[in-house]
Amino acid sequence: MSTSQSQMENSISSRIASLQFSVIRDMSQRAANMADCISLGIGEPDFDTPEEVIHRAMQDIHNGFTHYAPAQGDPELLKVLSRQFSAWTGLEVPESNIVVTPGGMGALSAALQTLLEPGDEVIIPEPYFPAYKAHVIMAGGRVVPVPTSFDTGFTLRPQDLEQAVTSKTKALILNSPNNPTGNVLDAHTLDELADIVRDKKLVVLSDEVYDRMVFKGEFESIGTRPGMAEQTLVIKSCSKTFAMTGWRVGFAFGPSWLMPQVIKVVNYATTCVNTPGQRAALAALNMDQSPFHSMTESFHRRVDLLWNRLQEIPGIRCHQPAGSFYLFPDISAVTPDSTSFALSLLEQERVLVIPGQAFGASGEGCVRIAGTVDEEKLKEAMHRLKRYVRSFHPS
Ligand code: PLP
């Protein structure tokens, strides 16, 4: 690198320079040109967006939905969201408290930019979706990870949350159903966490992008706990729910002291979410939901298949996921180094999984497996994984 180039590199803000490229991206690039690789790495439904959604969005494009939408979102979409969010939460969610964002990611980023002063702390139960850390740092905040462990099913313990709160704590990010662990917070835990959040006057960013992928019982949100609607910004997304990752449409809703400010940030950052994408979201919300239910059923079957196969591999233990499409098996009895485990698995057996340390230090010793390929490929991947693990302890 020339001297002038390295001098110019000093112009990059230290916040941005400190961010690492995502391990998920790095691992996926390694696997990209490998023939016969089975990728259990990417957190994206393998199903295509249903034809009806595409058809209706195309019709709307032909009918002139190619212009800017209002910054807050397409008015028809906001109306439907208000009705559905109110029905799901049992609370009144007026249109004025909703914003359409570029995916759940856009909601997360806008919320953190709206809330954080430099140095404000954001508590994130670990292991966590890696983008959380980047977004907190980009918004000038400081991440305070709170480790969880395999032994507690990766559930955040209320006493650990309480201990992590300082005078600088502004927010808590909760993600249930969880990426990477597949954990779903139960009603009792949500009650206990809500007590602390209320007491400490924190804002919860409740990332619910996998809310439709719950395999037992009904999904519950911390935002529905008494008084919590005033302290919770809920993040939803079309990406996983409707197999619409590429359309980039998500939503946030929250209290009226907060949402106009978030809408202002979304407005300046994006002008509006792409109009055809918003029309596609409207179509997905309005149509018969059975294609989406069968997607969830497929994920449930796949996760069960993976979990059952993992039980047969000595040295691996795994919780049965309650939601999402991820499993987070503990491989530490095979080797404590999840990165070398994942790299050699890829080299030797052409199976891509993500090392647990990509999700924070307490993810070390585990790997993330995504059930985002069909059952035949999953069976083959588990066969290869079993062979690979056996190579550590030849019998
Ligand atoms: N939150 C979690 C937990 C995720 O796993 C993802 C994507 O993988 C997102 C948010 C962002 O999704 P999108 O921006 O596509 O809605």
Image: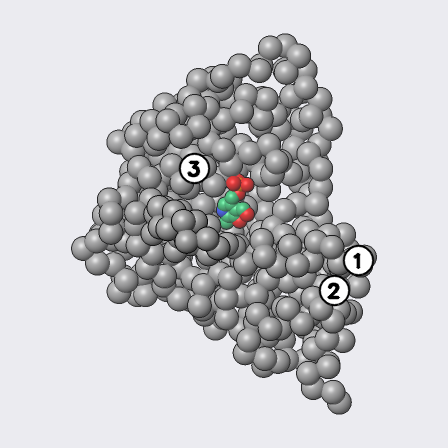
- Relative placement, left or right, of 11 versus 340 is left
Q: Are marks 1 and 3 in contact (CB under 8 Å)?
A: no
Q: In terms of sequence position, does the residue under pointer 2 or pointer 3 come before the other? A: 3
Name the residue tied to disc 1: 35
Name the residue tied to disc 2: 350
Q: Are marks 1 and 2 in contact (CB under 8 Å)?
A: yes
Q: In terms of sequence position, does the residue under pointer 1 or pointer 2 come before the other? A: 1
Q: Residue furthest front?
A: 3
Instruction: Kindly report which numbered mark, 1 or 3, lies closer to the viewer in this rendering.
Output: 1
Above or below 290: residue 216:
below
Task: Give the camera-side residue of 98 and 245.
Answer: 245
> How many residues crowd mark 2 within 10 Å: few (<14), some (14–19), many (20+)?
many
Q: Residue furthest bottom?
A: 395
> How many residues crowd mark 1 within 10 Å: few (<14), some (14–19), many (20+)?
few
Q: Residue at x 24, y 44 (%)?
A: 117
Mark 3: is the Cβ under 8 angstroms from ligand 1?
A: yes
- Relative placement, left or right, of 80 versus 326 is left
Q: Residue at x 74, y 71 (%)?
A: 348
Mark 2: is the Cβ under 8 angstroms from ligand 1?
A: no
Q: In terms of sequence position, does the residue under pointer 1 or pointer 3 come before the other? A: 1
Above or below 279: residue 112:
below
Q: Residue at x 60, y 38 (%)?
A: 245
Instruction: Find residue 308 and report its horizontal and vertical position in percent.
Output: 70, 67
Q: What separation in Å lies between label 1 and label 3 (alpha carbons)?
A: 37 Å
The answer, for residue 247, to whether it is visible in the render is yes
Name the residue tied to disc 3: 107
- Relative placement, left or right, of 105 versus 257 is right
